[in-house]
């Protein structure tokens, strides 16, 4: 695109934004999420009300590989993206003419997968002359909570997913300070690896969670607290401890009940996650705790964090299961905050697989 056409596009976007702000009407944002193996599109009104949230999952395709195959995921996104957007608009009873901005995940994630969503979002933005908003995937998970309850700052957000485990301090909308993050395996990765060792299907998290409810946490496993003042996480050693426990038992001809091992593993993971979160609440004086990410669907984690937050007298917000996994409604919700501030991306927006939350701010 030459400079003249680019200038015209930017002018159209600016005019569209100003005209809508002056009208005082509701804001409809189309969200697009393609960071991993879900193709999702959603229409959200005023950053709070979900009118549609369509998710085309690839879980069954990748299950036989024991994990997500990037090239396969990207190709499926190409096949699904247009149909998913059309369905989201249809479910919301909206047309593209009704949409005021496009919010899209641009990182972190699989680069090929990200590029499909970014390309679709840029095409719509260019064709309609409406703002394009780049959203960090983790910011989206955090803002899934705002679709349930208004945020009360300052707050602590515990983000736990397949590829991310982070403790985030927020003083206001769009302000992210990472207090701690995973140094090796994220919690979700550890769940998948332990599930594989127990011959459970992929993804392993839900299967470990269900099995843990049937057992007793009576298998000694370590807690990785790291340095005394650290808010970082490390689950690689715990995963190795589980594998060693199974290996040693097999050499001795002993049998370990899978349910008890699952319960012990989950007890170790949730204790570290919850206690570090509550320590951060006390140290920073948080008014609210948010739980976010795919592992937020874990019943053991939800129940333990709920009980501890009640003991500490701090409100806890947890999204419904439908908003815990990757979805476009959370991207639209996070995008609304940037729309209100007039923080738009240009047509040079690209997928950034290693994007950090601090860079996004």
Image (tube, helix red, strand yellow):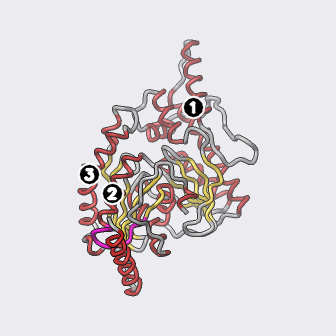
What residue is drawn where x is 24% and y is 62%? 86
Residue 264 percent coordinates (x, y) = 59, 34
Residue 137 percent coordinates (x, y) = 47, 55
Circle 2 packing at 10 Å, graded few (<14), some (14-19), many (20+), is some
Do the numbered discs 2 and 1 sit on residues whose CB atoms are within 8 Å?
A: no
The alpha-carbon separation of the residues under discs 2 and 1 comes to 38 Å
- Read off the magenta span: 125-133
- Picture layout, residue 79 above or below residue 13: above
Q: Where, by quadrant of the figure, is residue 10 drawn?
A: bottom left
Which badge, 3 or 2, comes first in the chain's sequence?
Answer: 3
Which badge, 3 or 1, comes first in the chain's sequence?
Answer: 3
Q: Secondary structure at mark 2?
A: helix
Do the numbered discs 3 and 2 sit on residues whose CB atoms are within 8 Å?
A: no
Query: Foreground residue, 21 or 234?
Result: 21
Q: Secondary structure at mark 3?
A: helix
Residue placed under numbered mark 1 in the picture: 239
Residue placed under numbered mark 3 in the picture: 80
């Amino acid at each position: 695109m030459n400079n003249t056409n680019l200038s015209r596009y930017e002018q159209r976007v600016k005019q569209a934004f100003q005209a809508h702000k002056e009208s005082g009407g509701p804001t409809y944002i189309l969200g697009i999420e393609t960071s991993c193996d879900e193709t999702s599109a959603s229409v959200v009104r005023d950053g709070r009300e979900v009118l549609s949230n369509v998710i085309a999952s690839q879980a069954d395709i990748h299950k036989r590989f024991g994990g997500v195959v990037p090239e396969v995921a990207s190709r499926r996104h190409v096949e699904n993206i247009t149909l998913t957007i059309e369905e989201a608009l249809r479910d919301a009873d909206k047309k593209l003419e009704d949409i005021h901005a496009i919010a899209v995940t641009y990182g972190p994630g699989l680069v090929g997968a990200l590029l499909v969503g970014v390309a679709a979002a840029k095409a719509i933005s260019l064709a309609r002359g409406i703002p394009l908003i780049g959203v960090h995937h983790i910011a989206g998970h955090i803002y899934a909570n705002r679709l349930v309850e208004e945020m009360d700052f300052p707050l602590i957000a515990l983000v736990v997913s397949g590829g991310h485990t982070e403790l985030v301090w927020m003083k206001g909308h769009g302000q992210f300070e990472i207090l701690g993050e995973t140094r090796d395996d994220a919690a979700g990765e550890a769940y998948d690896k332990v599930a594989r060792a127990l011959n459970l299907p992929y993804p392993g998290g839900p299967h470990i969670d269900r099995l843990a409810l049937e057992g007793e946490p009576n298998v000694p496993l370590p807690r990785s607290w790291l340095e005394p003042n650290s808010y970082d996480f490390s689950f690689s050693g715990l995963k190795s401890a589980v594998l060693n426990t199974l290996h040693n038992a097999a050499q001795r001809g002993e049998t370990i009940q899978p349910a008890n091992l699952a319960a012990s593993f989950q007890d170790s993971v949730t204790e570290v996650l919850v206690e570090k979160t509550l320590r951060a609440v006390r140290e920073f004086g948080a008014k609210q705790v948010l739980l976010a990410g795919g592992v937020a669907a874990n019943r053991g984690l939800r129940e333990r964090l709920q009980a501890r937050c009640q003991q500490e007298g701090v409100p806890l917000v947890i999204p419904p299961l439908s908003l815990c996994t990757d979805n476009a409604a959370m991207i639209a919700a996070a995008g609304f905050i940037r729309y209100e501030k007039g923080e738009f991306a240009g047509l040079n927006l690209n997928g950034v697989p290693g994007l950090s939350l601090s860079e996004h701010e």
